[in-house]
Every structure is written in C-alpha cells, then in structure tokens.
Amino acid sequence: MKIDILTLFPGMFEGFLNESIIKRAIDKKVVEINLVNFRDFSKLNNSQVDDTPYGGGSGMVLMPGPIVDAIDAYRKPFTKVILMCPQGKVYNERKAHELKEEKHIILVCGHYEGFDERIREFVDEEISIGDYILTGGEIPAMVVSDSIIRLLDGVIKKESYLEESFTNNLLDYPVYTKPRNFRGFKVPDILLSGDHKKIDEWRKSEQLKKTEQKRIDLLK
Ligand SMILES: C[S@@+](CC[C@H](N)C(=O)[O-])C[C@H]1O[C@@H](n2cnc3c(N)ncnc32)[C@H](O)[C@@H]1O
C-alpha cells in the first residue's frame, strides 16, 4: 500500500514515521508513506497557499489551486483521495478495515481556518476523527494511517487485532501480567488455571460484560 500525505507541515510526521511499529512496517516495505508539501505546488511568487476569506471573517483559508494540483500530480485511476475534515464521516475501526484493502490513498491535511469549499469537489470522501477541532489535519492523517497500517499483513499478528476492541462490536477482554498481586489487586484465578477452554469462555463473557457496562451502543 502507498499513502501520500498532502501537508504544509511534513516535519510533524517525523516521530510517527520513525518509531516502533510504523517504522518497522515501512522498513519491511509493507507500506510506503510519501509526504508532499503542497506549498511546492503554489504558482504565486512567495509560495502562498492561503488567503483571507471572501465575505470577511477570521483566519486564513487554503486556496484550491495548490492542493488540487498536488492531488492531480499523485492521483492514479484507483486512488482514494480523502480529505481530513471535522465535517466528514466519523472514523471507526470498520472504516480502517475497509481502507486497508486500498492500494493507494491520498490524505489531504487542512490547516488554519480550513480550506476553500471547492476542494471538496476533487476528493472521494471526507473523514473526521471525532467531534472536536484540531489545528490541522496532520494528527487525523496519522490516526487514519496508523489504524490502517497495523492491519496490513505482516505488521502485527492477525490474532492480536481479531480480538481487539471494536472487532465484532465488542470491547477487548481484561488482560494481566506480572506480578500476580499488585497492591492487593489479584490476577483472576481462572487465568492461572491453565485450562484454556475455561479461559476462552471467561474472556468472551468479560468482553460482553465490559461492552454492556461501557459501550452498550456497540451491541445495538
Ligand atoms: C481548525 S480546522 C478547521 C475547522 C473548520 N473551520 C470547521 O469548523 O469545520 C483546520 C483543519 O484541521 C483538520 N481537522 C481539524 N479537526 C479535525 C477532525 N476532528 N477530524 C479531521 N480533521 C480535522 C482539517 O483538515 C481542517 O481543515
């Protein structure tokens, strides 16, 4: 899979791309991530990419030209172009599973007050990572990329994500490690029993219990 990220601030991705699981996925060539500074597509003298809004109002608005030219330069017939936008459909694990099947994704990061409305005409969909406003689309692009990359073959063990929260609309079961007794809180006896059938049953019932307690909406 290839992900092109269109951003004015490629430096924000440094840590994301150079640490832990994402770095390993890139090194193993499971995914290629390409940062594109769409300022390079500005045709104006000072590489300007934004301007004041028509009709007045606060903040600067990203002009359509540089972003759409950057999309045109990287888009292939099979590419999915996604705008990071708080007005988009709210992201979830199901969407991550859907996007992991794509060969090529372009993520467009807005900034400042936002982008010229006409940019929406040139993207396939809009994704929000939740009902709050961030300073730019860079963190949302990292969230979306991270959640997709960990699902790609060879990145983490399939068993790991098949049992995780939101798969099958359930939250994950409780997990414990050493010590057996931490400040009086003990590891449940069943996990020390060695009876794997019983452990599986316990985990399934804990998943259901937790989901009912914390996220009843997932069961509806
Ligand atoms: C300050 S926000 C603009 C918000 C815009 N004025 C609005 O109210 O809808 C700047 C950029 O950050 C990104 N962004 C902010 N919050 C986001 C969210 N919850 N999900 C996805 N992208 C977000 C978008 O790319 C957006 O264009």
Image (tube, rainbow, N blue to C red):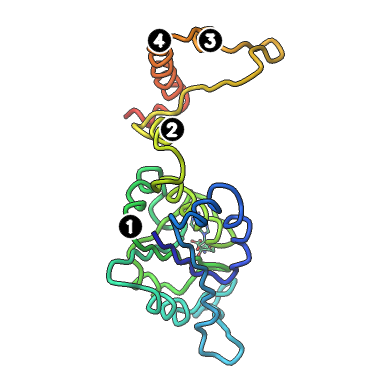
Q: In which quarter of the image is the N terminus?
A: bottom left
- For numbered disc 2, what is the local secondary structure? loop
Q: Which of marks 4 and 1 is nearer the N terminus?
A: 1
Instruction: Give the residue number, with chain letter if any, for mark 1.
Output: 102
Residue 220 % position (x, y): 32, 29
The answer to whether 50 is drawn above or below residue 19 in the figure is below
Say which amino acid is labelled 4.
Answer: Lys
Spatial CA span between label 2 and label 3: 22 Å
Which residue is at 49% across, 52% downward?
A: 25
- Mark 3 Cα within 10 Å, few/some/many (few <14, many 20+)? few
Labels 2, 4: front one: 4
Residue positioned most to the front: 28
Spatial CA span between label 1 and label 3: 42 Å
- Foreground of the two, 204 or 122: 204
Spatial CA span between label 3 and label 4: 11 Å
**Is the CB of the residue bearing disc 4 within 8 angstroms of ligand 1?**
no
- For numbered disc 3, what is the local secondary structure? helix
Instruction: Give the residue number, with chain letter if any, for mark 2.
Output: 164
Q: Earlier in the sequence, mark 2 or mark 3?
A: 2
* Quarter assignment of residue 135: bottom right
Q: Earlier in the sequence, mark 2 or mark 4?
A: 2
Residue 111 % position (x, y): 55, 67
Which residue is at 55% across, 81% downward?
A: 51
Q: Earlier in the sequence, mark 1 or mark 3?
A: 1
- Mark 1 Cα within 10 Å, few/some/many (few <14, many 20+)? some
The answer to whether 17 is drawn above or below residue 21 in the figure is below
- Mark 2 Cα within 10 Å, few/some/many (few <14, many 20+)? some
| Side of 184 where 150 appears, left or right | left
Instruction: Give the residue number, with chain letter if any, for mark 4.
Output: 198
Labels 1, 3: front one: 3
Instruction: Give the residue number, with chain letter if any, for mark 3.
Output: 192
Spatial CA span between label 4 and label 1: 39 Å
